[in-house]
Image (cartoon, rainbow, N blue to C red):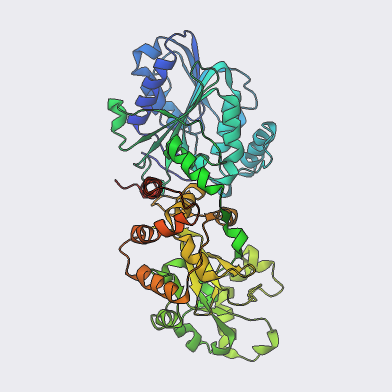
């Protein structure tokens, strides 16, 4: 099986295509002379599934299949008379074909913008522009396939696509979600705890089915634990009528759970009310500009560096980065020093430093986009001063909100924090670690293969936090408890009652337990464990 990120050829498992075809055959049982479009034939898995489904096959008048790879297209061409294969790039093909279809199904290619050819980018922009998307620039080719194929449907058409879960999560797909709700009376989304494409760097995948007309209108969700469960059809679709957020990740919750979170959220301020946050230092080449103690010594950089924390994995297990802990990182030869060159005259005669700059030029660091925009490529801009705290935008088990007692800088792997007014950073960090706030972190953020959660600047700023005041000694105890925890659940169990009661003293024990279960459910969903 060929899987190539340049062509987006991550082929659909047969069990998935068989399921979709069988499932769609029931939706199309009262129709005849059905026309089908497959915009990305690939290895022909959907065509084979149709051939093997005699009930649906007998209702189909024609199948048009588009495929850029002629060798792949030849594998399926000639198998049945109603199949007409077209050797073409779908983006080119769609300019001429104005046919309307009863069914459009397939698995659009997954190719990021950086790997697209210029003509493909321009065609994607045209498709996005026609759909009146405010941002016409493609982030990935699948979005153009989705937008264009919606237009291919006739009045009663059905679209069935295998898509990346980005559709549910990311900001750039918000308008696509709005388009789907506008175009389809009924939307069904199937998510999975098991990765469908294990060789696609862990990209989570969903099944989307949209019906232009339906007697049972609404948006419905179903989460499948194992792909094999598709065969026994034991899954159950549940309607979610409480779409309040721009993202759709909340569909893992029941209506009652969504309403509980929404009720409490309305009573809370958000992170941005308590502090200001912005991205840390952008070096444009961390491996070069951030060095360890050995490089500092070798090239005589002692007076030309500043202490810096490079990434979140260096601050595991605590909510405070102390001077002692940072010193341990230095002694372990972790990259902990930022090359800070802001006055050319300071190193004009420093031969060892010039040797290090020559290494950068040999590596062509100076030709990178961001470094090439600088007056002097080796001067990292906007270094500033050490912040009060860091919030690391990516995490595994839980978001890391760290008080900066080590008085160090941070890269843009973190948002740097300065408190507003009389609010204290210790109070905010303590208050952050409760099941409600962490649940919203799961809902607002997006996740990658392997369960890595990421929060964009606005997603972090809009997290609701029940801010409470604690004493210095209690914060010290909290930090010790954090270090000794077995998991973040220990901290939530310890803090939830007092923190959530501060929102509303009338909140009952059952609601607090429910919020804890919501956090755990969303976390388990993200990391794909049972």
Q: Quadrant of residue 327?
A: bottom left
Number of labels in the image equals 0
Q: Which x, y percent locates residue 95?
A: 65, 27
- Work out whether residue 65 can be spotted: no
Residue at 30% across, 63% down: 486
Tell me which residue sits at (45%, 58%) in the image. 499
- Specify the quadrant of the image occupied by residue 139: top right
Residue found 56% across the figure and 73% down from its top: 388
For the N terminus, which image quadrant? top left
Whether residue 436 sits left or right of residue 129 in the image: it is left
Q: Position of residue 198 (x, y in %)?
A: 36, 45
Give x and y (percent) for residue 217.
Answer: 51, 21
The residue closer to the viewer here, 482 or 12, is: 482
Location of the C terminus (image quadrant): top left
* Front one among 36 and 469: 469
Specify whether residue 338 is in view: yes
Q: Nearer the viewer, residue 136 or 314?
A: 314
């Amino acid at each position: 099986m060929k899987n190539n990120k340049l062509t987006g050829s991550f082929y659909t498992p047969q069990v998935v295509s068989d399921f979709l075809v069988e499932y769609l055959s029931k939706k199309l049982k009262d129709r005849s002379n059905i026309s089908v479009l497959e915009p990305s034939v690939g290895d022909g898995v959907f065509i084979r599934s149709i051939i093997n489904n005699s009930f649906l096959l007998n209702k189909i008048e024609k199948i048009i299949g588009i495929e850029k790879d002629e060798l792949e297209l030849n594998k399926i061409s000639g198998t049945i008379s109603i199949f007409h294969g077209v050797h073409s790039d779908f983006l080119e093909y769609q300019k001429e074909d104005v046919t309307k279809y009863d069914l459009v199904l397939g698995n659009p290619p997954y190719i990021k913008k950086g790997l697209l050819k210029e003509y493909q980018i321009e065609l994607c922009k045209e498709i996005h522009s026609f759909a009146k998307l405010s941002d016409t620039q493609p982030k990935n080719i699948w979005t153009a396939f989705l937008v264009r194929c919606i237009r291919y449907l006739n009045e009663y058409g059905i679209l069935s696509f295998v898509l990346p879960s980005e559709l549910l999560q990311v900001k750039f797909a918000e308008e696509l979600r709005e388009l789907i709700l506008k175009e389809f009376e009924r939307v069904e989304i199937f998510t999975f705890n098991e990765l469908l494409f294990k060789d696609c760097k862990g990209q989570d995948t969903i099944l989307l089915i949209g019906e232009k007309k339906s007697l049972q209108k609404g948006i419905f969700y179903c989460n499948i634990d194992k792909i094999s469960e598709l065969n026994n059809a034991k899954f159950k679709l549940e309607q979610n009528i409480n779409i309040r957020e721009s993202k759709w990740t909340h569909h893992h919750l029941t209506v009652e759970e969504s309403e509980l979170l929404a009720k409490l959220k309305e009573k809370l301020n958000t992170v941005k009310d308590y502090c200001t946050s912005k991205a840390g230092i952008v070096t444009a080449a961390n491996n070069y500009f951030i060095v360890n103690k050995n490089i500092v010594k070798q090239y005589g950089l002692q007076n030309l560096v500043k202490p810096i924390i490079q990434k979140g994995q260096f601050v595991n297990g605590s909510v405070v980065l102390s001077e002692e802990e940072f010193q341990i990182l230095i002694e372990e030869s972790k990259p902990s020093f930022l090359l800070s060159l802001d006055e050319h005259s300071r190193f004009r005669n420093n031969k060892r430093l010039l040797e290090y700059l020559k290494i950068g030029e040999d590596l062509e660091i100076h030709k990178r986009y961001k470094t090439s925009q600088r007056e002097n490529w080796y001067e990292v801009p906007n270094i500033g001063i050490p912040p009060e705290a860091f919030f690391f935008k990516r995490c595994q088990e839980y978001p890391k909100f760290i008080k900066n007692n080590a008085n160090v800088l941070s890269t843009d792997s973190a948002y740097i924090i300065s408190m507003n007014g009389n609010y204290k950073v210790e109070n905010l960090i303590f208050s952050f670690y409760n099941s409600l706030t962490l649940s919203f972190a799961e809902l607002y953020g997006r996740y990658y293969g392997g369960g890595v959660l990421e929060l964009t600047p606005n997603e972090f700023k809009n997290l609701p936090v029940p801010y409470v005041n604690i004493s210095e000694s209690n914060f010290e105890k909290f930090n010790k408890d954090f270090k000794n925890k077995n998991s973040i659940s220990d901290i939530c169990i310890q803090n939830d009652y007092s923190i959530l009661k501060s929102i509303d003293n009338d909140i009952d024990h059952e609601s607090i337990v429910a919020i804890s279960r919501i956090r755990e459910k969303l976390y388990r969903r993200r990391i794909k464990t049972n």
